[in-house]
Amino acid sequence: MIRERGLDSWLPTYLRQIPKRHNLRRLRRRQLTHILFLVCDHYEPRHGVRRPEDAAARVRAWHSGYRQLQEDNQARYGLRPLHTWFYPPHHGLEFLPAIAAMAYDGLGEVELHYHHQGDTEESLRINMRKALADFRSAGLLLQAGDPPVTRFGFIHGDWALDNSAHGKFCGVNSELSLLEELGCWGDLTMPSSNECQTRKINSIYYAVDDPKAPKSHDWGEDARVGASDAPGLLMIQGPIGLNFGAPRYPRIENASLTSLNWGRADRIRTWLDCHVHVRARPEWLFIKLHTHGAIEEDFDALFGDKARTMHRTLAEQFNDGKRYRLHYVTARQAYNLVRAAEAGMGGDPSPYLDYALGKQATAYYCLDARHRLECCTAERLEIRSIDPGTQSLLKLGYLGLKSVRGPLRSCIVDVQRSLLEIELHGDRGELTLEGNVGSLKTTVGAAVRSRADGAITLACDGPITLNF
């Protein structure tokens, strides 16, 4: 059991930190603590499915269920929970557009969860580059910009980051360096509370890769105020420890969120007492949880009654504005707050959510067909090489539009010039635009076929230009 729960790795560190936790708990009583709450989901919709259609049904249930949770929480407490889906490509590329749509609708953001085994550095590089290309073709793992740039957070499959499972589920001792090379801004795998568990716990730190040895992240240099140029890959850990306030008997706390072990009040207090923070900025306290939330049995802990109870407890007991202020953040936003703290920023963390790494492209659009994103900013969107199909649905937030549907081949939105340029697959086609279509002034290459409240259908002959 000692090896199975990783006790030999983390328990000695946890016991040595008892005085530190005691002092930080006393400090919390004298100051306002900003709680930065993030849920990192190892999102695997095909896990244990009996029928092929079950996976798609899970994704649909998530979209509607989590949106309702958000709306209810906003109405009751003025707070909007956020989620981060770490999606593994082997669970199906066909789900990427649906997950991108959840991100576009403001439910959270998408990062990378990756399972592999028996790889070499070169085979892993090849396979991950392909996976990243597949995500890019859905507009994912891209920092918005001109051009967009691949940046992503990472969670390793089976916890085996940097070959830490004694050769199983990985095989690559140089994985940390490879992740940095490919655009990874940080790892959020820990804690595991198993054989992969690191000695360093309840920390935000930098791990310098040793390509000749596994588990280079077993220890590292703490992120700290005034030190923003530390070498290595950033590690953002969740809380791990002992919960003596659990029902019936003390339990190991490993930050897992399930319907059997959900976000009870006693667990929230334990998460706080682990006090994960950037050194010298203890008033910004990070609570990073993990879950395998795509399976029905854990829906209750993520957007069911148990989730609502957890969020009610957080809002009523840990958001009074005097001792605590609660902030729901995504993994990317947590990274930005780490970098802001390192740079000496303090006080309210809200202005620094996009401090070092800008918004993801899904903040501006989503498209349900494979494509190549050339530009994505608040002023311009340029999409090329859209896969042919009878209809593609492009959701966007430019010029008062909500969506464009049709046989799209390419699309350019220029806010400064107030125009929308579209190229179709084929010589002729039909487009349906929804949103503020009343501001449409002129069309070139298209004629109005029908008009309804908030929507317009155009008959198109070749490339078209719409002026708003």
Image (cartoon, grey):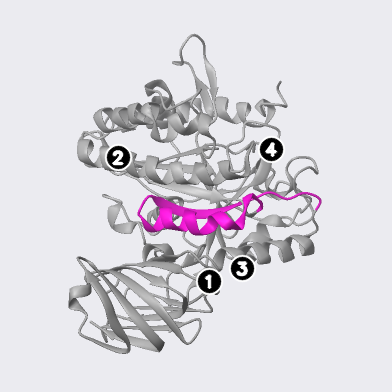
Q: Amino acid at mark 1?
A: Gly
Comes first in the chain, label 1 or label 4: 4
Element on which disc 4 rests: loop
- Left or right for 53, reference 423: right
Cα separation, mark 2 vs mark 4, equals 31 Å
Measured along the vertical axis of the image, is residue 215 above or below residue 463? above
Instruction: Specify the segment rendered in magenta.
Output: 90-118
The residue carrying pointer 4 sits among few (fewer than 14), some (14 to 19) or many (20 or more) residues within 10 Å by Cα, namely many
Residue where numbered disc 4 is placed: 196
- Left or right for 278, reference 158: left
Q: Residue 47: x, y in percent? A: 62, 39
Cα separation, mark 3 vs mark 2, equals 36 Å
Element on which disc 2 rests: strand
Cα separation, mark 3 vs mark 1, equals 21 Å
Q: Amino acid at mark 4?
A: Cys
Measured along the vertical axis of the image, is residue 397 above or below residue 256? below
Q: Residue 321: x, y in percent? A: 20, 37
Seen at 32% across and 41% down, the residue is 68
Please name whichever residue, 196 or 216, is drawn nearer the observer in this view of the structure. Answer: 196
Seen at 46% across and 12% down, the residue is 247
Residue where numbered disc 1 is placed: 389
Residue where numbered disc 3 is placed: 133
Cα separation, mark 1 vs mark 4, equals 45 Å
Q: Amino acid at mark 2?
A: Leu
**Splitting the image into 4 quarters, where does residue 464 fall?**
bottom left
Please name whichever residue, 304 or 353, is drawn nearer the observer in this view of the structure. Answer: 304
**Splitting the image into 4 quarters, where does residue 219 fall?**
top right
Please name whichever residue, 89 or 176, is drawn nearer the observer in this view of the structure. Answer: 89
- Left or right for 359, reference 203: left
Q: Is residue 110 magenta?
A: yes
Residue where numbered disc 2 is placed: 326
Tell which tag, 2 or 1, sits nearer the viewer. Answer: 1
